[in-house]
Amino acid sequence: MDWWVEIKAVWERYRWWLCGGLATILLAAVAGGWLFMHVPDSKGTTAQTMPQFSATSAASMSSRTTSAMATNVKHDTKIMVEVKGAVNHAGVYQFAGDARVLAAVKRAGGLRADADGQQLNQAKKLTDQMVVYVPMVGEKVPDSMTTAGQTETSTVAGSESGGADAGATVNLNTATKEQLTKLTGVGDKKAQKIIDYRTSHGGFKQVDELKQVPGFGDKTVQQLVPHLSLS
């Protein structure tokens, strides 16, 4: 039984070391098992979640950047628009690329008292080289000068409506009777009076001379001046 005595002596001498070692091994086994069960799942979830977040964030940032760039381009683009007719200050004005007919009317001093605002679509977008023509109440606008109206096919002279060139003018000294009647407010009788006047006076020296023709008052001539020429 000497061997049993020796084992007992060793146990009595080193039992705390042996217990500590067994406890350490047990804790290591428990910790290893926990890591095996939980750490791989956590890593896998992280690995799967991160790419999705990155892709979504990149797409969102790209969309916002594109939208911001498009907005800046619209504001940076400059267009030239001519405003004619029953406005207080007709002329050519510069606008931002996203401006509307409303802005053009305001820039031209607003509508006159005799303007027919019902024929205008003031929400329509302006385009470069567009002509916004504001008619007077009761005025029948000729095909060669359409208004900023209610439809897509008849909107603003010089736009994609397919009408006559908004920049075209009628020559007072060479126009035929038919051409003269295309002017706003000019019928057969007034057209003939223009022809009679230029024949008897050797032609018009200036456009304002039209006031000397019977039936043409200051307001009428003022409306016609943008559409007339002498050469």
Image: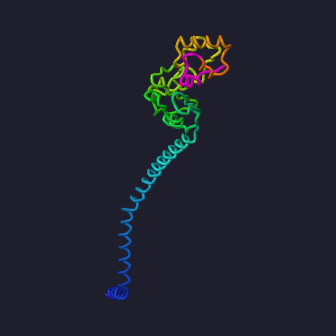
Query: Which coloring applies here?
Result: rainbow
In magenta stretch: residue 218 = yes
Task: Name above or below for residue 195 compared with residue 43.
Answer: above
Quarter occupied by residue 198: top right
Q: In front: 205, or 162?
A: 205
Task: Name above or below for residue 54 compared with residue 153.
Answer: below
**How far from the left and from the top, in percent, is residue 22?**
36, 77
Q: In front: 77, or 99?
A: 99
Q: In front: 8, or 158?
A: 158
**Rendered residue at 52%/35% (across/down):** 104
In magenta stretch: residue 172 = no
The quarter of the picture where the C terminus appears is: top right
Locate residue 18 relative to residue 129 in the image: left or right: left
**How far from the left and from the top, in percent, is residue 215?**
54, 17
Quarter occupied by residue 137: top left
Locate residue 4 relative to residue 51 in the image: left or right: left
Numbered circles on residues, count: 0
**Rendered residue at 37%/88% (across/down):** 13
**How far from the left and from the top, in percent, is residue 163?**
53, 20
The quarter of the picture where the N terminus appears is: bottom left
> The magenta stretch spans which residues?
213-231
Task: Name above or below for residue 15 compared with residue 67.
Answer: below
Q: In front: 127, or 15?
A: 127
Task: Name above or below for residue 97 compared with residue 16.
Answer: above
**Rendered residue at 47%/28% (across/down):** 114
**How far from the left and from the top, in percent, is residue 135?**
49, 25
Quarter occupied by residue 200: top right
